[in-house]
Image (spheres, coloured by chain):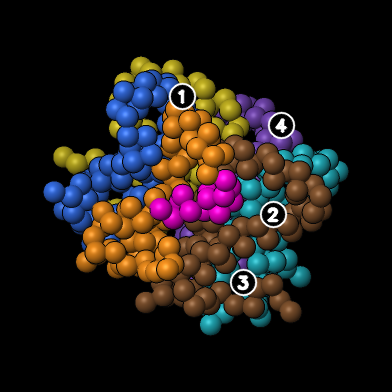
Chain colours: A brown, B orange, C blue, D cyan, E yellow, F purple
Amino acid sequence: MSWLPTLVTETPEAGFELAIKLSRMAVKKTQPDDAIRGRLRADYENSADSLTMASHVVAVHFQTVAKANNYWK
Amino acid sequence: MSWLPTLVTETPEAGFELAIKLSRMAVKKTQPDDAIRGRLRADYENSADSLTMASHVVAVHFQTVAKANNYWK
Amino acid sequence: MSWLPTLVTETPEAGFELAIKLSRMAVKKTQPDDAIRGRLRADYENSADSLTMASHVVAVHFQTVAKANNYWK
Amino acid sequence: MSWLPTLVTETPEAGFELAIKLSRMAVKKTQPDDAIRGRLRADYENSADSLTMASHVVAVHFQTVAKANNYWK
Amino acid sequence: MSWLPTLVTETPEAGFELAIKLSRMAVKKTQPDDAIRGRLRADYENSADSLTMASHVVAVHFQTVAKANNYWK
Amino acid sequence: MSWLPTLVTETPEAGFELAIKLSRMAVKKTQPDDAIRGRLRADYENSADSLTMASHVVAVHFQTVAKANNYWK
């Protein structure tokens, strides 16, 4: 089964979770090694700027998901 | 209750507050530990570039929220 | 009175000023202390990259404001 | 044959793969030397921020691809 | 007279020039001192990353200008 | 003759090439000296993050070009 069958979600909150998932999948596709990603997690989880950068990527994906759902209107 | 029941807000100012909330929620979802986020707060609150980066994320979310509200027209 | 009653402006230039205001308000909401922001101002005012980063945030908000005004057409 | 005959994909997942491809092609067009790109791979694969930056570029392309496909609705 | 009377330009090339102007005006509004901006110019003109950052801001404004002109179609 | 007579291209691939051209032109307009740009090329061609930053700018322009071409549909 696909990890991304659709961009449609029932609620804005579920859409936000999907945006987070999309952000992480792009990282995983570039660095597929779970152990390395685990080590790197300690880096960005403790850096304000790294967390802001991660939040930025979520924001870009959330634009896409929100539009795909016609802003849940 | 959902922390994000809707993207609709009554006013542009409320929409701006929602954009800030969205920015912070993505950080919280990545680093859920309140104590660590509290410590990191001292870092970015005292760095011009960190504040600009945070402002950038708000700007991206504000695009989404503004569109969802048809620019409050 | 709201600091952001509307995204509508009479002219493109006024829209650009609003985009600058939006950029700065997100900083102010994150770091509300005027004295600290004043000290940080010396940092980014004298750094080419910091100024470019600030200009970037204005550009994102200007997209929003321009669209809200149907590009002043 | 073109490496980019169309932006249309059958599924969201295939669209995400195309977004990754677009991100990498821009790098390849700037640095066409496979050996150098291979060496640089070790750098960004082991840096949390580099991976976030790469994920950001994918997010921007995914906006384009998703829109080209009318969000696969 | 306004420095930004309209976002409409006759040609795509003129639109690109306007995007550059918008990028620079945001810098000027943040750092109005011509002498300081002149000194900083030496910094970013000789840094590959600074030039890429500047090019990024132009790209965001060009999106706005291009849309305002209906892509000069 | 203009270096940018139109945003319309025959194919997606040609549109991608135009996005690369737009990215580079903004750099050239900021740093017109060919010799300096040539020296800086060695910097960003050998830095993973610099290449990702460059790829990001291409992604933003490709959004514009793709939309101008109605996604080549």
The residue tagged 3 is D7
Q: Viewer-nearest of labels 3 and 2? A: 2
Q: Can you tell which mark lies on residue E37?
A: none
The residue tagged 2 is A27
Hey, what amino acid is under mark 3?
Answer: Leu
> How busy is the neighbourhood of tag 3: few (under 14 within 10 Å), some, or many (20 plus)?
many
Q: Are marks 4 and 3 in contact (CB under 8 Å)?
A: no
Q: Chain of mark 2?
A: A
* Residue A26 image position (x, y, % from top left): 67, 58
Residue that appears at 50% across and 21% down: E42
Q: Chain of mark 4?
A: F
Q: Mark yes or no: residue A68 visible.
A: yes
The residue tagged 1 is C47
> How busy is the neighbourhood of tag 2: few (under 14 within 10 Å), some, or many (20 plus)?
many
Hey, what amino acid is under mark 2?
Answer: Val
Hey, what amino acid is under mark 1?
Answer: Ser
> Residue E23's quadrant in the figure?
top left
**Tag 2, which secondary structure?**
helix
For the magenta stretch, what is the residue range? B21-33
The residue tagged 4 is F42
Q: Chain of mark 1?
A: C
For the residues labelled 4 and 3, the Cα–Cα distance comes to 32 Å
